[in-house]
Image: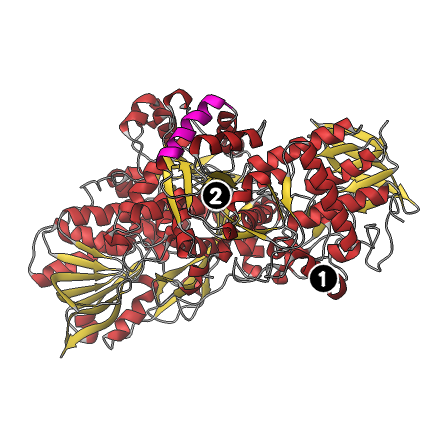
Amino acid sequence: MRTTIVIGAGLSGLMGALALAEAGLRPLLLAKGQGATHWTAGTIDVWGADERSPREALQTIITSRPGHPYALIGVHAVEEAITRFRALTEAARYPYVGGLERNVLLPTAAGALRPAALLPVTMAAGDVRLGGEMLIAGFRELRDFYPPFIAANLAAQGIAARGVYLTMPPAFRRREYTTVTFARMFDDPAFRSEIGRQLRAQRGNATRIGLPAVLGLRDPLEVVAHMQNESGAQVFEIPTLPPSVPGIRLFTLFQQAIERAGGRLQIGSEVIRGEGQDRRLTTIWSEAAARQQEHRVERVLLATGGIAGGGIRTDHAGIVRETALDLPVRAPANRADWFAPRFLDPHGHAIYTAGVATDAHLRPLGAADEVIYDNVAVAGAALGGADTVRERSRSGVSLATGWAAGRILAGLVS
Amino acid sequence: MRTLTTDVLVIGGGATGAGALRDLTLRGIRCALVEKGDLTHGTTGRYHGLLHSGGRYVVKDPQSAEECARENEILRKIMPHCIEDTGGLFVVTPADDESYADRFVAACRRTGVWVEEIPVREALRREPLLNPRIRRAFAVRDGAADSFLATHANADDARRYGAQVLTYHRVVGLERVGDRIIGAVCEDLRSGETVRIHASFTINATGAWAGKIAAMAGLHISVVPGKGTMIAMNHRIVNTVVNRCKMPADGDIIVPIHTVAVLGTTDIAVPDPDVYDITPEEVRLILEEGECLVPGVSRMRALRAWAGVRPLYREQDAGSDRDIPRTYKLLDHETRDGVAGIVSIVGGKWTTYRLMAEHTVDLVAQRLGVTTPCRTADLPVEPLHDSAASAPRSSARTQFAILASPFYMLGHRLAEVEADDSYGDLICECELVTRAHLEAAIRSDGTANLDDLRRDTRLGMGPCQGGFCTYRAAAIWHELRNGTAQAAGAPPATALIGHFLQERWKGVTPTLWGDQLRQERLNELNYLETLAIDRLPATGRDTIVQGRDYVIEEVV
């Protein structure tokens, strides 16, 4: 019987489960469905709200915003999480590069420049500061990548770029294409050779070629190397709208590492409630295919996400709830204060800061700051106190708090 | 400055204006139409889509009921492709006065509104989510109408007969010489150019804005803009129009239209048709009243709320807005005010737009000495070609027997996608808009932004509210228009993204909670985190023209 439970399969739950598995606690990860990995770009964004380096920003936040998730765990925990994460990705032959010293600016599928602290090496040649003309190449068959639009917006920002469409080799024509079908095609060397030849013909003066982030699911490094050889230029990936191939790779490598370390993942099981006494959570119930399952628990890592992930839910009466354990939530008191009039308001919408408040051990707190459960730690977007999408810190917060929560529950942090 | 000469100038690109334009051309009268936004940008594009059986007005406003009943049959005949034959129900809920039902039936008989009482269990069989405690149910000939498509089809027909349609042209003044109006001065909102239009006769078909236009000629019309708020639910909770069987009041109707169901409406007089908000109280009221018809509706997923302004004409003091007759009124300013060359058509409803146009053009034709009779009651309106919203193409028709009906069928787009095997070309998956639909709409000259494309194709109107298709549509727009003559003076594709997302946001916020809020957060992940459109420098300076006296959107 597994008594260490992680709830949620996003980056924070995966990172927490890894920490718990490596501590020998054989965690069981329960999740309603796939987590945010599948919806997002696959980079680790520690801080990108302004031009400061992530390290500089972290140091200020820790003193100026005590309720911020980064402040709860401290810079050291962020560093530790990044170190472990980099080692994990290197071992899986899908290394991430970068760090806290500076953000890399990467082209997006809209031709904007997006800051990221860590990125898969398959995206590294997209760093705009490297210089060199870009060729942006894609396929008309892929609905979420438009080279002419991307190139025009890059050019408007002074970055030499050209956009072209490639021709789908007849042997690979299908009825419908998604990012995932493309990734599987790139796993096939025959497809790559054909595309590589087209890229070489189209390359012109470009020294690097940006492609949609669909360069294989099995061995993306091999795919990039092959494309570089064929095309004679550096090749890099640009993240697309979901489903995210880099996110799926990340999920897969975590899953393998967690299972190797003795953990288990059970996707499709939604945790619907918990019960406990004397500040200890003792039992939780999960539901799958209309059958409830009872789990006696020693420790629980809650990583169910925020509003997007479904960990925090609102209703028409203006009530805001935490959905798995019904923990107290801090949220704007009045529904009238939830939203700013502009969708793109730089300060964001207040409702997205709603979440569970915790102490420095990530234990959930009640309205009077009393600890609700000693054996529960909260991580990721379920934590309140920050709009991490506006800060461009969402994946950084998830990675670091997930790691910290796992270490705390394993008793490895005093 | 450009100058243009025509016989009749129609001001207003809603249902009535486009209907009048077609009627004029069918009588061989030269004419032009000006509209400050896109066609249907005003009230026509902001109503729930009900094709009235007349049932709603039988007791309170019998004249309006009679008009609706007659026009309902005519519209079914001349534009079936714009109408879904949903049928309608009037039901007596436990909250309603039971004695009204008998008065309702008697009044239907008097006014010629077709009605048939059906057993409650039959009503519940047809609509399983209906309140099981309803006491009586009456079937009527209500339907759902696509007002975007119908207006475009009328305008297109008129164009084929030689009429000019000038969208994004705002009237800034009427030209008055002595006691006669001889045309209007307009501003082309896209180029900033002044356009002078000489016309022997002007038709003011601007609905809730009629008072504003008339004032430009020194005329006074008391139009009360009656704001009606509606909520779109993310699926068809009913497939039949469902009304409460009682005196018309707030929140007493559900209209299934295309992929959604619309709960309506409220009725609040607003001082200015350009300035109004949707209040949380209205939303609460509509959901609460909706619970009488469909228990649990307030816990279902609401997509968005919006409001339109009814063009209610107040001849003398009426008690409240709901007491102002729903019938229309043609104002002949020559006999009424001593100013020739202009008429105003006010009041009415979408269902009677053709009749209003006929009545108006009868008077204008008579003044111009034209004796050709009106033909719009008999001559079918041509379906639009290449339109995503119009009737199924023949390939889909032959393959799917169910589509043999002349009426619009909800399944027609899916049938087309299946017949053409075009799954891979879906740009808006929620509303099944294919790349071909979208490209045709982008290529048409009238469209200035993605919101115009939405009115043409239903892009972004489904559950994700533009979460995926906004990006795709803007990029395709860029590919088709960049460097072409159409692009001159137009906003860059990136500004279109910000503008469309903002338009969608305005509509979702009044009913934003639960799953729809979750969806909006995913849209933030897409546009802020993955695409970072807020970091595109050029968009800060761009503005999008959208009927300049409503809104100038500063796109961040």
Residue A4 lies, in percent from the top left, at 84, 35
Q: Which residue is mark 2?
A: B468
Residue type, numbered disc 1: Ile
Q: Nearer the viewer, residue B183 or B439?
A: B439
Question: Would you say residue A190 sits in the magenta stretch?
Answer: yes
Residue B203 lies, in percent from the top left, at 20, 63
Rendered image: mark on residue A1: none
Residue A326 lies, in percent from the top left, at 77, 46
Residue B541 lies, in percent from the top left, at 41, 65
Give the letter of the chain under mark 2: B
Secondary structure that dominates the magenta span: helix
Q: Residue furthest bottom?
A: B178
Residue A208: quadrant of the picture:
top left
Q: Nearer the viewer, residue A382 or A106?
A: A106
Residue at image point 40% right, 68% down: B318
Q: Secondary structure at mark 1?
A: helix
Residue at image point 35% right, 54% down: B449
Q: Nearer the viewer, residue A8 or B62?
A: A8
Q: Which residue is mark 1?
A: A61
**Eye-nearest disc, 1 or 2:** 1
Q: Reply above or below: A198 against B460.
A: above
Residue A25: quadrant of the picture:
top right
Q: Residue furthest right?
A: A278
Residue type, numbered disc 2: Phe
Do badges 1 and 2 share one subunit?
Answer: no
Q: Secondary structure at mark 2?
A: loop
Q: Is B516 left, or right, of B451 in this rendering?
A: right
Residue numbers of the magenta segment:
A188-201
